[in-house]
Image (cartoon, helix red, strand yellow):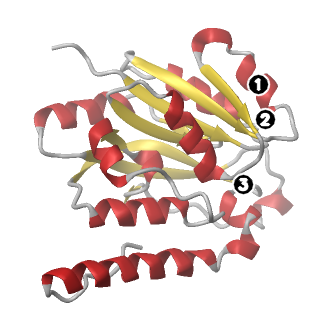
Amino acid sequence: MKAPLISVMIGAYNAEGYLVEAIESVFAQTYRHLELIVVDDGSTDSTADVARSFGDRLIFVPQANAGNGAARNRALQEASGDAFAFLDADDRFTPEKLDLQVTELDHVPDVDMVFGYVREFVSPELTEAERARVRAPASQAMPWTAPNLMLIRRPSFERVGRFEETVKVGVTVDWYARALEQALRGAMIPHVVLERRLHLSNNGIRERASRHQYLHVIKQSLDRRREQASRVGEPPAPPAV
């Protein structure tokens, strides 16, 4: 059988210091049949120049600043793959991520999406004073059902739909909640597939003022579940968090 084409998508905003590592982690994959799409979400630093330096090895798309959800959605417009993977511009894939997840999808045909474990690290360029402002990384790798650890079949993603663009935080929580509402089946492989960088510009730190939007996302999920339950006469399931 022909190996499926995987579209890997990176949305980047002011990520000049980290984007090279993210891109190189994609090109270092042991699974080779992939395309990489990088969307610059209106950065004011040299993020665009970093992406362009890779030439035609990737698809580069600039856009006005519109947020992480909009950047991912713009990348989706360019994606021609049979399966989708997402990566934040400050994180890194482990070399066998896609290989391991493609194998799982091949072996379990009724699984829609495959996740894995994440290992956190403090970005090495931080000073001691800056490190004190960043939370300590988790002591061990942990399973995580976030889209940036996921490989998902294209038709399965399309059942759920695009990422939310009206919130600055909670984009991935909202998408995963909708995936559960669509009864997508997920699998967790016991391997580290993502290295998550902790630094002073993580989205949760940068968008502190918007953290209340998490509650909005959770409330929307609960409201949808209540509506769905009312149609079938069952109590609503708790929202995904």
Q: Quadrant of residue 95?
A: top left
Relative to residue 210, is residue 234 drawn left or right? left
Q: CA distance from mark 2 to mark 1?
A: 7 Å
User: Contact, CB < 8 Å: mark 2 with mark 1?
Assistant: yes
Q: CA distance from mark 1 to mark 3?
A: 20 Å
Out of 152 and 87, give the one closest to the viewer.
152
- Residue topped by disc 3: 199
Query: What residue is shown at x 73% (from left), y 31% (from top)?
Result: 62
Which class describes the residues within 10 Å of circle 3: few (<14), some (14-19), or many (20+)?
A: many
Amino acid tagged 2: Glu
Above or below for 71 versus 142: above
Which class describes the residues within 10 Å of circle 2: few (<14), some (14-19), or many (20+)?
A: some
Q: Tell me residue 131's x, y (percent).
A: 76, 60
Above or below for 133 versus 2: below
Query: What residue is shown at x 20% (from left), y 36% (from top)?
Result: 105
Q: Say what secondary structure mark 3 lies in.
A: loop
- Residue topped by disc 2: 16
Q: Which mark is residue 50?
A: 1
Relative to residue 102, is residue 35 drawn left or right? right
Quadrant occupied by the N terminus: top left
Q: CA distance from mark 2 to mark 3?
A: 14 Å
Q: Earlier in the sequence, mark 1 or mark 3?
A: 1
Quadrant occupied by the C terminus: bottom left
- Total label count? 3
Amino acid tagged 1: Val
